[in-house]
Amino acid sequence: MSASAVNDFNDTIVALATPRGVGAIGIVRLSGPRSIDIANGIFKGKDLSGQASHTIHFGKIVDGESIVDEVLVSLFIAPRSFTKEDVVEISTHGSPFILEKVVKLLLKNGARLAKAGEFTQRAFLNGQFDLAQAEAVADLINSDSEATHMAAMHQMRGGFSRKIKALREELIHFASMIELELDFAEEDVEFASRAGLTELINNLQKEIAKLIESFTVGNVIKNGVPTVIAGKPNAGKSTLLNTLLEEEKAIVSDIPGTTRDFIEDEIHIDGISFRFIDTAGIREARDKIEAIGIERTKARMKAASVIIYLVDLCKERAQEIREENEKLQAMGIPYLLVGNKSDKLESSELDTIQKQFPGMICISASDEWHIDQLKQELIERIHLGDFKTGDTIVTNLRHIDGLTKTQAVLDDVLQGIGNQVTGDFLAMDLRQALHHLGEITGEITTEDLLGNIFNKFCIGK
C-alpha cells in the first residue's frame, strides 16, 4: 500500500449510522482512540471507561444539567470492532432533533464529523478486510434482491478475494525466481523454468477468463435484467406490464399507439431483479411523436438483455408472426415469443398455433393465464445456474478492469517467452501483472483510488 494512501487516524469520528428521518430508534456511531472518553463526557450512567467490550449500558445523554434522552450505549473495544478501533454506538429514540443534538454534543466534546465511507475505510486500512471485501459492504447495503444479497455476502466473506490472492501467490513465486536470475545475469543461470512458467500462465489465464466471463452474470445480478416488452400496437404490452408489476403502472386502452414513450419499473422474480420496459408499438408511424417513440423502442430492444415480444393471437396471422420471429432471431438478443389473448381462442385454434410455433408461450395478460410460466422462462433465459451453485461471480467494473489488464500483460509474458526475451523484460511484465491483481484486493492502492471507492459510501458507514 502506498504511504500516501494512509491517512492520520489519530482523531475520533462521529456520524449517524441509521437513515435520517423519524423512526423508533436511531444510532450515532463513534470510532477512534477517544471514542469512550468523548462519549463519557455526555453520558450519565456507568463510567464507560471501566466497562468490558461488547457490553450495553443504559443511561442518559445530558447537555449540562439538561437531559437530552434516555439511551443504550454499546461498547466495542479495539481491536474487537468493525474498524479495529474503539467504537461506541449510542442508541437513542428516533427523533431527528435528538439525533442531531447528540451528534452536536459529541462534536463539541472533541469528535469530528466522519466523511463518506470513513468507517469502512478505517476498517480496510486497519486490516479488517481487503478492498474487494470493503466494496462488498456497500453492495450489501444496496442489495435489493436475494441474488444481489448472495453475491455481496460471498464477496464480503472473502470468496472473490481468496481467488485473486491464490492467483497472485502463484505468480509471485515465478516472479521471484525471474528476479533472482537478474542478480546472476553474468553467470547465465536460469532459476525459473520457462516451460513451467508457460504452464502456470496458461492456467492463470483460464482462471482469469472464467472470472471475466462471470461478469455477464454478475452485472445482471447487480444491476438487474433490462427486459423490453415489445410488439405491435394493442398487442397487450401495457396490460402485461401491469400484470407483472401487480399495479396499474401503464395506461391501457383499445386505441392503438397509446404508449408513445417507454414506461419502466422493476420487480424481483426468484430473487433476480428484472427491469421491465413497456415500449411504443412497432408499426408505420402516424405522426412525428409516434415515430420518435418507435425509434426509442428499437434502441431499447438492441440494448436489452432479453426481449418479451408480444403478438396478438386474435389479429396477427401466422405469416406475420413468422416474419417477426425471424427479425428477432436476426437481432441475436435472447427473446421470448409470447402469444397474448389466448383466452379468446378455441382450444383447437390454440393447438394449431402451438404446433406452428413450438417455442411460443401462450398467455392471457388480462386474466394472468400462464404468467408464472412466462416468469420461469425469463429466469431460464438469462442463464443464472452457475451463480446458484455458489461459484465466484464478478460484479464490479473495477475488478473486471483489473482482470482484463492482468490478462493482457500475461499475454505479453507468453509472447516474450515464445520470443526468448531476456529475464528483465519478463520480470517487468510479471511485476505489472502482480500490480493489477494487487489493485483489486487493495494490496496496492493510491489515495485517489481509495477516495473514489469510499466516497460512494453513505456517511456513517
Image (cartoon, grey):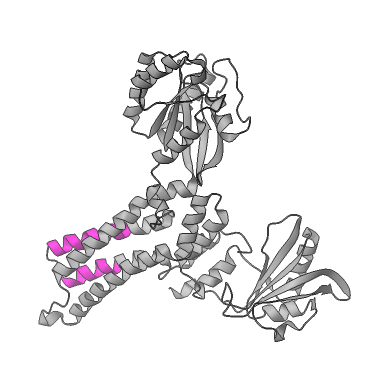
The C terminus: image quadrant: bottom right
454 or 325: which is nearer to us? 325
Q: Position of residue 158 (x, y in %)?
A: 44, 66
Q: Is residue 66 above or below residue 23?
A: below
Measuring 79% from the left and 76% from the top, which residue is drawn there? 42
Measuring 58% from the left and 15% from the top, which residue is drawn there? 254
Say if the magenta span includes residue 345: no
Q: Is residue 75 visible?
A: yes
Compared across the picture, whether 299 is left or right of 429 comes to right
Measuring 36% from the left and 52% from the top, which residue is drawn there? 214
Q: Is residue 377 above or below residue 324?
A: below
Magenta span dominant secondary structure:
helix
Q: Which residues are magenta?
A: 405-432
**Residue 201 sits in which quadrant?**
bottom left
Q: Is residue 395 above or below residue 122?
A: above
Q: How many marks?
A: 0
The N terminus: image quadrant: bottom left
Q: Residue furthest bottom?
A: 50
